[in-house]
Every structure is written in structure tokens, then in C-alpha cells.
Image (spheres, rainbow, N blue to C red):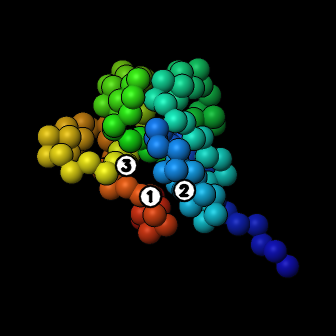
Amino acid sequence: MLEHCQKKFETIMIIDDNSIDLYISSRIITKNDFANTVLPYISAKLPLTYLKKHKNTPKLLPNLIFVDIYMPEMSGFEFIASYNELSLELKNKCSLYVISSTNNEKDIDQIYADNNIVAFHEKPITKAFLEGLA
């Protein structure tokens, strides 16, 4: 008899311009039953539009947002600056994590100085990392 597997999260949003990292992260999340829905984005502009559009519909907002910082068009830091301007209610629903391969001290200091960022994790997203979340 198959048991219904309870997912840890309803929705996880991933923002990363590297399509391979985006695919691997999405597969790790779905394969290990960490979320019912994964919202993958290869650019930071569309997820911002998504968050603004659904700001009054909490069930459509992601529980977790994983964002890379080095991306063309709109960097992760630019996304974070725009995210910081969103409502407190939205930010209370969505936990923001920076997932990056950076080892730049200035970048890391900037990440840790932002109160809306829960944590920094070095790429790639792993099962062990996900198991340590909420």
C-alpha cells in the first residue's frame, strides 16, 4: 500500500540563470519530496512580477525563495533590493535564501547584512541542505 508522502513545503521558487543548476535543484527538490510545486526562473525579473501579482494570495506565494546573485539583466542583489521593498506580509510568507558559488567577501558581507535573507548556502542545493530547512 502506498502512503501519501507529506511534502515539507508547498512551493519553492528558484532563481538562477544557469539552466543546469536550475534543473538539478528542481530535480533534487521534487525527487526528495520537499515541495509540491517548484517555480524555476532563469531570470530575476519574472519572479518579482509573480510575487507582486500574488501578494494578496498567500497560498500562491512560495514558502522558500532560492536566488543566485550573479545573473545578467537583473542580479540577485537587485532582486533582493526589490524584494526588500515588498510588503511585510509577503516577506513573512516567503523565506529568502542566497544560493551562490561566490567566495567574494564583500558579497558575503552584503548577504549577511540583509535582515530579509535567512541564510547563504554555497551551490549546489543538496538533499542535506534541504533536510536542514524548517
Q: Are marks 1 and 3 in contact (CB under 8 Å)?
A: yes
Q: Which residue is mark 3?
A: 99
**Residue 45 bears which disc, if any?**
none
Kind of residue at badge 1: Ile
Front-most of residues 35 and 70: 70
Kind of residue at badge 2: Ile
Position of residue 57 measured from the top left corner of the image (x, y, whole percent) = 62, 28
- Give the distance between the C-alpha atoms of the residues marked 2 and 1, in whole angstroms: 8 Å
Mark 2 surroundings: few (<14), some (14-19) or many (≥20) residues within 10 A: some
Q: Which residue is mark 2?
A: 24
- Give the distance between the C-alpha atoms of the residues marked 3 and 2, in whole angstroms: 13 Å
**Residue 125 bears which disc, if any?**
1
Residue 15 visible within the image: yes
Residue 63 visible within the image: no
Side (left or right) of 4 relative to 30: right
- Give the distance between the C-alpha atoms of the residues marked 1 and 3, in whole angstroms: 7 Å
Q: Are marks 2 and 1 in contact (CB under 8 Å)?
A: yes
> Mark 3 falls on what kind of element?
strand
> Mark 2 falls on what kind of element?
helix
Front-most of residues 107 and 88: 107
Side (left or right) of 102 relative to 73: left
Q: Which quarter of the figure is the N terminus placed in?
A: bottom right
Going from the N terminus, do you reach mark 1 or mark 3 first? 3
Mark 1 surroundings: few (<14), some (14-19) or many (≥20) residues within 10 A: some
Nearest to viewer (mark 3 / mark 2): 2
Going from the N terminus, do you reach mark 2 or mark 1 first? 2
Position of residue 49 measured from the top left corner of the image (x, y, whole percent) = 54, 21
Position of residue 103 measured from the top left corner of the image (x, y, whole percent) = 21, 51
> Mark 1 falls on what kind of element?
loop
Q: Which quarter of the figure is the C terminus placed in?
A: bottom left
Taking the spot 52% from the left edge, 54% from the top edge, the residue there is 25
